Image: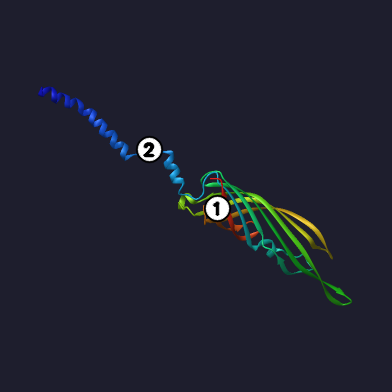
Amino acid sequence: MGILRVINIFALLPLLLATNLTSAQTSVAPVATPAMAHADSANNVFHKGSIIGTISVGFIDYYRNNITMPAGFQKNNTSGFAPIYGRLEYGLSNTISLGALMSYDIFYDNFYQHFPVNGKIFERHNTDRVLVFSSGLSGYYHLGRILHSKKLDPFIGIGLTLNTIHHTAWPEGDSTATTANYTVSPSIKIGARYYITRKGSIFVDAGYDRQSVFSIGYSCRFGK
């Protein structure tokens, strides 16, 4: 009986060792699950499928500050409103979004012309109402997976915009004319959103788009 008991114990040893080894491997190297991946993405403020609408106001107006008068005309003061931006973005993934953007700018450019009359120099004053409308597409890369922030959504963006510049009294020769110009320009931006609620955030960006140097506004998130 003693010999049979010893033989039975040795026969059970491989089974016991295999069971312990399997338990150790399971505890050391757990298998990643979709729930764990979702928990990791939950640490990021930007998510795939998000729809974000933004409205902002631009500052340091490019067109207003860079209009040059033809020969014989002198630029005077300029008045009007700041550029207004509208954006709508869709999250293609947890890091990339595609956005459609529009901007509207209107201002009044005052100028004058010197002309001689009976040996004297007189000034003829006029005002050109300038309307600038731009629309385009941009792609954005969101840096939330690097920062793992639940409130801050920094991004960089690049795209193209089509600009329509309409003048009501552009100086030509000794008179003025209504003209419209069309240009295509790149849009290169860096910015961030800071969420003050689950859906609402403060928006700021800066860069080049021929409209303004930087803008500040508000974003609202829909979808996921």
Colour approach in the figure: rainbow
Task: Give the amino acid at mark 2.
Answer: Val
Name the image quarter holding the N terminus. top left
Task: Give the amino acid at mark 1.
Answer: Ile
Compared to 150, does 27 lie above or below? above
Crowding near the residue tagged with mark 1, few <14, some 14–19, many ≥20 C-alpha atoms within 10 Å = some
- On the image, the x and y values in percent for residue 63 come to 69, 61
- On the image, the x and y values in percent for residue 209 come to 64, 56
Q: Is residue 210 visible?
A: no
Query: Gap in Å between the C-alphas at discs 2 and 1?
Result: 34 Å
Residue 192 found in image quarter: bottom right
Residue nearest the observer in this picture, 167 or 218: 218
- Per the image, label 1 sits on a secondary structure element best described as strand
Question: Quick check: 112 left or right of 139?
Answer: right
Residue 103 found in image quarter: bottom right
Crowding near the residue tagged with mark 2, few <14, some 14–19, many ≥20 C-alpha atoms within 10 Å = few
Q: Residue at x 46, y 47 (%)?
A: 42
- On the image, the x and y values in percent for residue 116 come to 85, 74
Q: Residue at x 37, y 38 (%)?
A: 31
- On the image, the x and y values in percent for residue 155 come to 54, 53
- Residue receiving disc 2: 31
Q: Do tag 2 and tag 1 residues touch (Cβ < 8 Å)?
A: no
Q: Residue at x 22, y 28 (%)?
A: 14
- Per the image, label 2 sits on a secondary structure element best described as loop
Compared to 166, does 41 lie above or below? above
The label on residue 156 is 1
Q: Is residue 182 visible?
A: yes
